[in-house]
Image (spheres, helix red, strand yellow):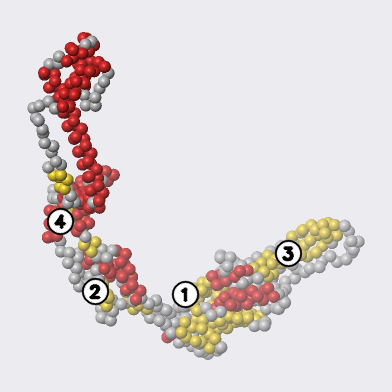
Amino acid sequence: MAAKHSGGFTIKFRKRKKKNSGKVDTASRKNVRTAARSSQGRSEKYSAKPYVKSAKTVSKNTKTVSNSAKVSSSTKNTVAGNAKAEKRKFNKWLVFLFAVVAAAAIASAHLPEIAETVSLTKKGTQANAKHAQTYLNGVKIDGISVGGLDYDQAKMLIENSVNTELTGNALVVKSTDGNKRYEYTYDSFGIKYDIEGALQAAMKFGTVEEEYAADVKALENGMVDFPVYSYNIPKITSCIRAIGAANTQTAQNAKCTYTNGGFEITPEVVGYSVDTDAIYKKAIELIDARQFNQEIEFEINTIQPSVTSADFAYIENELSSFSSQYKGGDENRIQNLRNACSKINGTIVYPNEVFSTNDAFNPCTEANGWASAGTIVGGKLEDSPGGGMCQVSSALYDAVLYAELEVVERHNHSLKVGYAQYAFDATLAGDYLDLKFRNNTGYPIYLESYLTSSSVVVKIYGYNRFSPSRRVELENKFIEDIPHGDYVIVEDPELPAGETRIEVEQLDGKKYELYKKIYENGELIDTVKVNTSTYRPRDGEKHVGTGASSGNEDEDDNSGSDEDNEDDEETYYDEDTD
């Protein structure tokens, strides 16, 4: 007989011919004699165990050799048969061993081929298992029910039902004037069909233990549909944003600067934009519906600037000018005057816009350019950042009044200040006392402010609404005095007993009103009340000595005066920053 191997090798096994069948061969006879001599302790390799046991039994019983020779003819035949069986068994084991060795040698030589065969077999088994499965009832692929179908059946159904052809452009986006056109491929939007992926995902549905409960619930809600079609939202968004960026320009107002005694106008820039939200919405609508090779049109919208060069046509007209003198010597205060002027210089206030002085000056810190300068709080001199800024705000207030702009907010100091007449001042404090005015001219106005060697100067330029013959005068009117009280007495141990010193002078309070007088061609045509300003009285402070006597009791100890010096050059500060 012969066994064929896939490698082409053939192993032949030759049968042994039976000789002298029916006769007792020489080996059998030897076995009989061996059994007979068992009482002497001899044994042979191929002796039959049943027969040896019988011979021993006979030997023990009879103790004679003659009795063992009288073995029956049937016993001899049994012994011979057992010996043959043992030999055949041994021969079979030899053949089996040889076959194993040969097979191992062949397998070693052809191991890659065997591995490939096993792999193909395994894949085939898996494929058969997959195709043997069916889709769960209620499962859809791209809206088509595939419940009960196997993989091949579902694949054929979907391929015949869904048009996966992608030709031409996905979409074209263009402007209505035809000047801008953007063509997008399917890859631009990440558009693709994947039937295999949908089939596999649908087959997997309901087979994952961790997802089983959610899958069952989805089936109950009728929401199990595996699309074969997909697109990329981020890619679409990026494309639409690029259209917006290419068709967007921020509108820029015309600008005005004052240099070298003249104005320079920078023209405006017209802006434009597109409605990218509308483009995106339409694109998604078409892509969702798989309507390709379509065109989307968009409008390019112009955006006009709010201020044009024409608005500055009258900017060169000087509407008002006001100057306020200051004393030199205090460098920190002069720095603050200069800093305040710089913060309003070059400001353009547009029509109907409200200007806030606090917004321009704050924060009142050294980092913002403010130095510590003398300010009297409660009648006493103290250093604080920004001392002197109110001289600039007061000059600005007077310039605003002469330009006949609308004053929105203004506060007088609580005490008279030396750089301004009663009712002509404007104080600032934190974010609760401010000077605000509105541009009511209908055109932009320009603020110029600077410091000379002796004065704070503020000028306002813009459109003059009134006739050239119009003139304005400002006049304050005294209303009443507000008497001060007695000195506040402070005991001073550093001052000798019996001596006194005026620490803070007494001042009566005042109440004034400010009026605007309007003249046309030199004739007074109107008088308008502008404000009412009340300045509180100051009781003053007197120190009385409680220390050791100096022996000069007869000398005059009244070094101060309670006389009202409202017309001199002394400056009186209050607790507000000025």
The residue mark sitting in front, 2 or 4, is 4
Q: Position of residue 490 (x, y in %)?
A: 77, 58
Nearer the observer, 523 or 134: 134
Residues under labels 3 and 4: Cα distance?
Answer: 104 Å
Amino acid, disc 4: Lys
Tell me the tag on residue 155. Answer: 4
- Mark 1–mark 2 contact, CB under 8 Å? no
Residue at disc 3, secondary structure: loop
Q: Residues within 10 Å of mark 2 (few under 14, many from 20)?
A: some
Q: Position of residue 273 (x, y in %)?
A: 34, 75
Q: Residues within 10 Å of mark 3 (few under 14, many from 20)?
A: many
Q: Which residue is mark 3?
A: 540
Residue at disc 1, secondary structure: loop
Amino acid, disc 3: Gly
**Residue at image coords 18%, 55%:** 141
Q: Which residue is mark 2?
A: 172
Tell me the tag on residue 353. Answer: 1
Side of 144 where 403 appears, left or right:
right
- Asked if 467 appears above or below 204 in the picture, the reply is below
Amino acid, disc 1: Glu
